Amino acid sequence: MGVLDEGHVEVGFEQETLAIEEAVKVLLQGLGEDINGEGLSKTPARVAKALREGTRGYRQKAKDIVQGALFPEAGLNNGIGHAGGVGGLVIVRDLDLFSYCESCLLPFQVKCHVGYVPSGQCVVGLSKLSRVADVFAKRLQDPQRLADDVCSALNHGIKPAGVAVVLQCLHIHFPNLELGFLDSTHQEWVKVSVCSGKGLFENAKATIWSDFLSLLKFRGINVEKTCTRDSTGPCWCPSQSSSALIPCKIETVHQMVTAVTSILRSLGEDPLRKGLVGTPNRYVRWLLNFEKTNMELKLDGDVCGKMDPFQPNCNEEEMHSELNLAFWSQCEHHLLPFHGVVHIGYFCTKGTNPIAKSILQSIVHFYGFKLQVQERITRQVAETVSSLLGGDVIVVVEASHSCMVSRGIEKLGSNTATMALLGRFSTDDTAKTMFLQRIQNTPTS
Ligand SMILES: Nc1nc2c(ncn2[C@@H]2O[C@H](COP(=O)(O)OP(=O)(O)OP(=O)(O)O)[C@@H](O)[C@H]2O)c(=O)[nH]1
Ligand SMILES: [Zn+2]
């Protein structure tokens, strides 16, 4: 599908959406979930709606957007460098977009900066630069191809003396599950910057690129000029590097991979195109991290034996805490990740000693890697720690929800905190305040 061969033929929107819902049911069953269960009955419909919204760009045509918004504007004279007509650089910076990674089907964030040099004595409506960028962001994308698509479409639509696009992309970091633990020092995002240029910007060494990058610097945006990524180079998506085997019944995996392939087709994509080969497998591998495991919380070995032997026995007045324990989870409403940190505080009864950090991380890990809601994780972690220590536990969870950032309300930077108070923490404000103060005074990892 070329950029100018824009938009897919809209074939039976409803029937395609229903097909996606059926495929999502197969995925939920593959995870061992009851699709008629309380929190999940509407999930297939929500996920289908979210995917259709997230790939609406296939049903839109960039040229329709630009055509109606080219305004005649005389330049100072016919030389390059005078605003209006044949004139100076116009750039729109810090456009927040969200796209879907074609490699793993997870949403990624985009800071988009678009610039062009008007020609033909006319300028384009500023908002249309963002609208055109959104048409191509709302597809299954790779950063470089997204930059090239937007650049080509604007070049074709506006017929400027030159057009340039710079994208700064952020992809969720994948936990290193192969090592069987969450590195709590993990960095939150995989970052990549790409650019694309046409006309005066075709040559990456053209001085007009320096003008563009200087205007970005005014906003604290520092981008390397030569940031065109070679499509044969390593893929930016972290799912490409995790080769962990999928620990699941092979026929279940096959059914799930087939279901994801049918979702790609229902979205109007070609599962056999280069960027999508392997995507169903990668997406199923990601999903199986959240398989419903009914096993009782398996704490490696006898917890008491794992209490932290290097710490003296507790005295009842001393509060212990483990802060910024990393967690990932998957929202059961949208099958989209939410991730962040868990803070745990507790008093241990006389004669016991504090729990080792690795045990607390295992507890967080166990409840995180499920289809969840944040309030439930918070409660489950608190109840489990309380069962080990006899009662006085406080848990605070802070997380960013992809379903609130990259779709629906699209509130970039929004973050949710939940708190569970057991025993003394639910009656003694001083203890609770002391713990919250400790979090406040501890920099996140
Ligand atoms: N309380 C809670 N809500 C969550 C969590 N994760 C997702 N949600 C919410 O689940 C709700 C699902 O609402 P619905 O109206 O059924 O689905 P929707 O139309 O996709 O909702 P919007 O996100 O508002 O577009 C949304 O309001 C989400 O924000 C969570 O961990 N805790
Ligand atoms: Zn990805």
Image (spheres, rainbow, N blue to C red):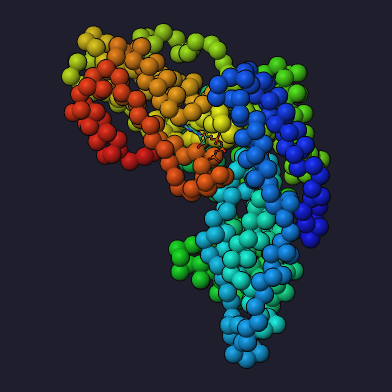
The picture quadrant where one finds residue 81 is bottom right
The picture quadrant where one finds residue 162 is bottom right
Q: Residue at x 63, y 40 (%)?
A: 50
Q: Residue furthest bottom?
A: 77
Q: Nearer the viewer, residue 199 or 294?
A: 294
Residue 281 in sight: no
Q: Is residue 278 above or below residue 296?
A: below
Q: Residue at x 63, y 61 (%)?
A: 131
The picture quadrant where one finds residue 31 is top right
Q: Residue at x 80, y 42 (%)?
A: 12
Q: Is residue 187 above or below residue 166?
A: above
Image coordinates for residue 20, horizontal then vertical, percent: 72, 34
Image coordinates for residue 323, horizontal then vertical, percent: 34, 31
Q: Nearer the viewer, residue 163 or 419?
A: 419
Quarter of the image with the C terminus in it: top left
Q: Is residue 245 above or below residue 399?
A: above
Q: Nearer the viewer, residue 6 or 145?
A: 6
Image coordinates for residue 55, horizontal then vertical, percent: 68, 47
Residue 416 in sight: yes
Q: Number of callouts in the render?
A: 0
Q: Residue at x 22, y 10 (%)?
A: 350
Image coordinates for residue 102, horizontal then vertical, percent: 69, 43
